Amino acid sequence: MIEVGIVGGTGYTGVELLRLLCRHADVRIRAVTSRSDAGKRVDSIYPNLRGFVDVAFSEPDVEVLAQCDLVFFATPNGTAMRMAPELLDRGVKVIDLAADFRLKDAAEWAQWYGEPHACPELLAEAVYGLPEVNRAAIRKARLVANPGCYPTAVQLGFLPLLAAGLIDGAHLVADAKSGVSGAGRKAEVPMLMAEAGESFKAYGVAGHRHLPEIRQGLAEAAGAAVGLTFVPHLLPMIRGIHATLYSRLTGSPGDLQDLFERHYADEPFVDVLPAGSHPETRNVRGANRCQIAVHRPQGGDTVVVLSVIDNLVKGAAGQAVQNMNLMCGLEETAGLMLVGLSP
């Protein structure tokens, strides 16, 4: 039985971790931390967990967390990098669902996140937790950087094309949309229903924090630096990401449908839809799954890939559990064979 702790258990990704882990046959939830709700029962804040999670929130105490086999950080950026070194020294494995260990360059991290990195010596060791790319390394890792939600959808859509060398990597476009839960569980005017409902807007056009993460992953797949225009949008819904990805062919591509099907043939959580399909976010709501469709409009030299995920599952907590399974020698799909909710 794997003893796990969750630092930051009151946010949306934290409660999603609890939802998945409380029914995982190989896991015991030992500690769930929250500074603001310490002492309160978890199911008093999230009644959907009544009868499944019988613990109370506690302060984030390293001595308590060090008794776990693995600790998830479902915290704001900047928290894990201050606690992870001591936990790692105590033999605890760490999965960070924030961005503290996603970028390999400490200076670039500081540029995008506004402060020096607290433990730059760990950046080289941290394994980027996209299982479809780094499965072997994740199995051996003690520190995993769980990918962001937008980066998961975008990378999974572009990777087959870049790996095959079929597109111009200098001119990639990712037009991505997310539900309001992507902003986290906090009271902000733009996230109020009266503000976000019946509206649709872009944001972060000048530069979003997920941009360097996506570029880093795509560059590794392409074997060279890539040029990416990434524009995120806010949708008036709670869960889901839809990424529409554009690229230009550099030669004769052959059968793109076959390329995608072969690339993801052995991936349990990537579903390549039949030719001509248009994936919808509702098809993956609540599931650790990415659905993808590839199009070549009018048979021209532009490829359009449609990629959808649930931002809280495959884009966060579900992928973190997938990484935990790999790190702990479990079946990768354990606790994650979930069917999307419909309607």
Image (spheres, rainbow, N blue to C red):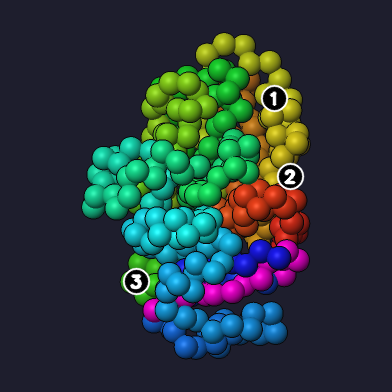
Give the percent coordinates (x, y) of residue 224.
43, 21
- Under tag 3, what secondary structure? loop
Q: Which residues make up the magenta segment?
A: 23-35
> Is there a contact, CB below 8 Å, between mark 1 and mark 2?
no
> Is residue 8 found left or right of 204 in the rendered image?
right
Residue 10 belongs to magenta span: no
Query: Which is more N-terminal, label 1 or label 3?
Result: 3
Q: Tag 1: residue type?
A: Leu
Q: Tag 3: residue type?
A: Glu
What residue is rendered at 40% in x and 59% in y? Answer: 86
State which quarter of the image contains the C terminus: bottom right
What residue is rendered at 38% in x and 52% in y? Answer: 100
Residue position for label 3: 188
**Spatial separation of the CA atoms under disc 1 and disc 2:** 17 Å
Residue position for label 2: 268
Query: Which is more N-terminal, label 2 or label 1?
Result: 1
Residue position for label 1: 259
